[in-house]
Image (tube, rainbow, N blue to C red):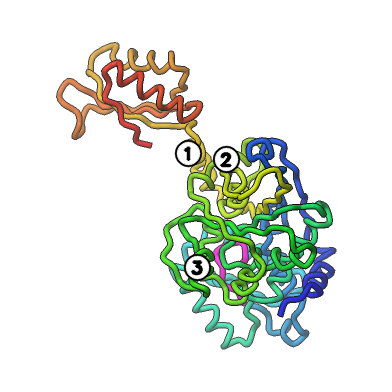
Amino acid sequence: MLTLQDVLQAKKRMEKTIHKTPLDHSYTFSKMSGNDVYMKLENLQKTGSFKVRGSFNKIMSLSDEERKRGVIAASAGNHAQGVAYSSSMIGIPCTIVMPKRAPLSKIEATKGYGAEVILHGDIFDESLEFALDLQRKRGATFVHPFDDLAVIAGQGTIALEIVEELPDVDAVLCPVGGGGLLAGVAFTLKQHNPNIKVYGVESSACPGMTAALRNNKPIVIQASDTIADGIAVKKPGEITYEIIQQYVDGVICVDEAEISRTMLYLLERNKLLVEGSAACSLAAVLYDKLPFKGKKVVAILSGGNVDVTLISRIIERGLFESGRFVTFSTVISDKPGQLNKLLRIIAELEANVLSIHHQRVGAKVLPGQAEIHFSLETKNQEHIHQIHQVLTNEGYVVEIIG
């Protein structure tokens, strides 16, 4: 059973090692949402994620004999780095099993903390099965990413920091996948003040905790790909589910467009780079998912480990979702001046041409014609609609292709 003393002890263990992350007030997001919005910046935590709190508390609670045998974990990302870093702090053996297709940056970061990295399996489930088998053979301690009381207690230290800085907080929103963060934060906040509302937020592409609460037990769900891959857990934990069922006020889903737009907002307006999973909590605030207004709300931004190769795609997707980027196609007569005529219309509509490509061969292209694909920087969805309407009125058959 989890106790408040467990969380307080976890806080004491990590005082000189783990960052007390900032609680940042946002005037912009407060104005946008109608609530008084604060952000708990766990993206600035050591290893770039809240995960290090739980893994550090778990590892520090091991006996001397357990430390000698070392630890094993399975992860494709933040948990791997948290376990590796925590192990390096006290110099114990650490093995991390990662999928073969794990991002190279995360593999190298995990190795950089001194862990032995084993690449096994094409998906996480295969890595997990191998790690558990290896743990049995070596007698090492398996550090679960969420379904462990010591891990949950470590994540609960975030709640202690929130109430220290904002004792009159009304509601806290946490990303939820396996449930370790949400369980720890909800339990701790409710011990402090049962009136604080606590909500989990997950991607509608992988609503594992929503399904668990609906079925009164964790179940395996079918999931789609999501930009919030850090919380794409098909079956939440048994321990975390029990705590969440008792202490959480609700679980909210946000869609891919809302997540990507929120990532772009944070990058552009607050200069904060966060993962898709971290953006979920703020997305719930910004897109009117809460049953109240005018409250002091904290959104936990759980991590900032975004693969460098994905950043440009994230920005492009966010721009597209917010109506600030669009690609059109149309067919024009392949004669001198026709392309210039099209571009003049676009210029008059105050759209900026980012790229243009034309081809004379294609399924839609007749002899004497050229198909034009042009990408534009636009103001919003209304501006895109205006461009489409004007071009249509000018006789162009225009298709939005992305």
Amino acid tagged 2 = Leu
In the image, residue 48 lies at what x, y percent?
67, 56
Q: Residue at x 50, y 70 (%)?
A: 235
Q: Earlier in the sequence, mark 3 or mark 1?
A: 3
In the image, residue 348 lies at what x, y percent?
43, 13
Check residue 76 for magenta coloring.
yes
The front one of 245 and 50 is 245
Amino acid tagged 3 = Arg
Q: Pointers 2 and 1 in contact (CB under 8 A)? A: yes
In the image, residue 393 lies at what x, y percent?
30, 17
The answer to whether 344 appears left or right of 53 in the picture is left
Q: Residue at x 19, y 34 (%)?
A: 363
Q: Quadrant of residue 45?
A: bottom right
Q: Earlier in the sequence, mark 3 or mark 2?
A: 3
Mark 3, residue position: 214
Q: Residue 30: give its label.
A: none
Mark 1, residue position: 321
Q: Quadrant of residue 391?
A: top left
The answer to whether 159 appears left or right of 377 in the picture is right
Toward the left, the furthest residue is 367
Can you say which quadrant of the picture contains the N terminus? bottom right
- Determine crowd level at label 3: few under 14, some 14-19, many 20+ residues with C-alpha closer than 10 A: few
The answer to whether 114 appears left or right of 206 in the picture is right
